[in-house]
Amino acid sequence: MRWLRQNWHRLLTHLGALLPLFVIVFAYLADRLVNPTRYVILQTGIMGLALLVASLACTPVRNLLGWQGAIQIRRALGLYSFLYITLHLVAYAILENDLDFAIIWRDLGERRAMAIGIVAFLLLIPLAITSTRGWQRRLGRRWRQLHRLIYLAAPLSVWHYLWLDRDFIRTPLIYAMIVVLLLLLRLPVISLRRIAKRVA
């Protein structure tokens, strides 16, 4: 029970991140979907973006609420986000296009959203690789500078979503507003610690 009291937030993070993956896999294998491939591509992309935004929110939540648990789950959220985004790309490349690079290259040239999504993914790769404490020790101050790439990757991911789904832009716009707010809260002139003290 003591372990559960101390680690409930970590447990919920893992369960909350993995459960949608099981749902996606089950729905795909059940063969009851009209377009299972598109379903997998869409759902993995949405989950990847949601978890990426959640990881971006951890520091503001810690600063505003004083809850250190937010920082303790930040790495897991980021890695799960990278997992879903990787599956998103794999589903597009293999399930939809059978690794036909001619088609993939054509899409990159004709669909600007694809190029933006690839750039966002490439920015996330070094963050995932260097997410361990070992890399944090090796890089020192450069680790923090490197992980600021999320400030580019998150807006680009939202942009990718917006351009892919122009007919239903409400959800991408909600994500865009959340990301803008989270980035503004990181500006030096906006001190969440000061706000939290005033609220208290």
Image (tube, rainbow, N blue to C red):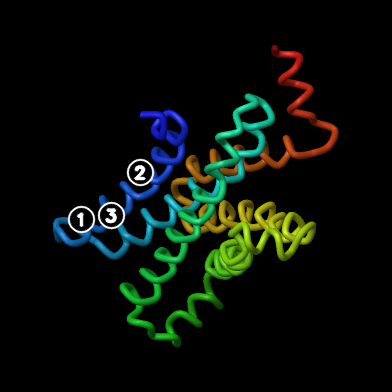
Q: Residues within 10 Å of mark 1 (few under 14, many from 20)?
A: few
Q: Work out which quarter of the rendered image holds the N terminus and state it.
A: top left
- Which is nearer the N-term, disc 3 or disc 2? 2
Q: Residues within 10 Å of mark 2 (few under 14, many from 20)?
A: few
Q: Is residue 113 above or below residue 22?
A: below
Q: Residue at x 55, y 58 (%)?
A: 160
Q: Is 55 left or right of 46, judged from the image as shown?
A: right
Q: Which residue is mark 1?
A: 26
Q: Residue at x 75, y 21 (%)?
A: 195
Residue in front for this viewpoint, 162 or 122: 122
Q: Amino acid at mark 1?
A: Phe
Tell me the CA gap for discs 3 and 1. Answer: 6 Å
Q: Amino acid at mark 2?
A: Leu
Task: Identify the mark at residue 24; answer none if there is no mark.
Answer: 3
Q: Is 167 left or right of 192, judged from the image as shown?
A: left
Q: Which residue is mark 2?
A: 15
Secondary structure under the numbered disc 2 in the rendered image: helix
Asked if labels 1 and 3 touch by Cβ distance under 8 angstroms, the answer is yes
- Which is nearer the N-term, disc 1 or disc 2? 2
Residue in front for this viewpoint, 107 or 100: 100
Q: Position of residue 103 (x, y in %)?
A: 43, 82
The label nearer to you, 1 versus 2, is 2
Tell me the CA gap for discs 1 and 2. Answer: 16 Å
Residue at the front extreme, as displayed: 2
Q: Position of residue 91 (x, y in %)?
A: 36, 69
Q: Position of residue 8 (x, y in %)?
A: 42, 33
Tell me the CA gap for discs 3 and 2. Answer: 14 Å
